[in-house]
Image (cartoon, rainbow, N blue to C red):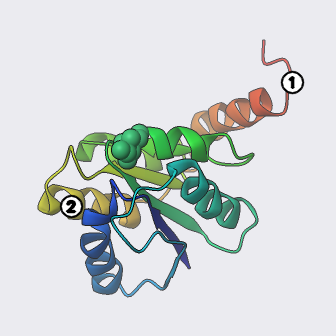
Amino acid sequence: MIALACDHGGIDLKDAAIEVLNELGLEYKDFGTDSHESCDYPVYGARAAKAVASGECEKGIILCGTGVGIGIAANKVKGIRCVICTDTFSARMSRLHNNANMIALGSRVLGSELAKELLRVWLTTDFSYDERHIRRVDMIMDIEAGKEIE
Ligand code: RB5
């Protein structure tokens, strides 16, 4: 199950995201918003992020005007590693090396075809499970837990 959420600034990419999810046969849960009416992106970023952090959803896709605000909000939820992404290399590496569990895209930055390609790459790339990348992701989570990492 993939969490999907956006604010009014990101809603124009929502259909593109749903198209890719359908194409890949992935079920999703839509956490809103559903209109172009102005709303607060942290609300929607947090809803999707909490669903991922709790295990209700395996990954999350969040959309705002730039991807930045909603991505920063999601990264404040414990357990979330959200990549704010505009290129396919970062989309791929964020899964391979960082085990990113959410992706944030900006509908005022990206065309729908590039957004769909980013999502295809991100959703179909697995974490490498390489020892050094496991260690580094664990260190990120240790920072979040307030532990010393050096
Ligand atoms: C809303 O106007 C806009 O600020 C929001 O969608 C997002 O781009 C914030 O980072």
Q: Quadrant of the N terminus?
A: bottom right
Q: Secondary structure at mark 1?
A: loop
Number of other residues with Cα within 10 Å of mark 2, as a class: few under 14, some 14 to 19, many 20 or more: some
Q: Please determine whether, in this image, residue 133 is positioned above or below residue 104.
A: above
> Is there any visible trace of residue 24 in the rendered image?
yes
Q: Quadrant of residue 94?
A: top left
Q: Residue shown at 33%/53% (left/top)?
A: 9
Dots 1, 2 in contact, CB < 8 A: no
Label 2 is placed on what type of residue?
A: Glu
Would residue 127 appear left or right of 145 to someone viewing this image?
A: left
Residue position marked by numbered label 2 in the rendering: 117
Q: Looking at numbered disc 1 in the image, what kind of residue is underneath it?
A: Lys
Q: Secondary structure at mark 2?
A: helix
Q: Nearer the viewer, residue 80 or 150?
A: 80
Answer left or right for 73 relative to 147: left
State which image quarter holds ligand 1. Answer: top left
Q: Earlier in the sequence, mark 1 or mark 2?
A: 2
Q: Residue at x 70, y 46 (%)?
A: 77
Count the marks: how many? 2
Expressed as whole percent of the image width and height from the top left, the position of residue 3 reads 54, 70
Give how far apart the Cα atoms at labels 1 and 2 are: 37 Å
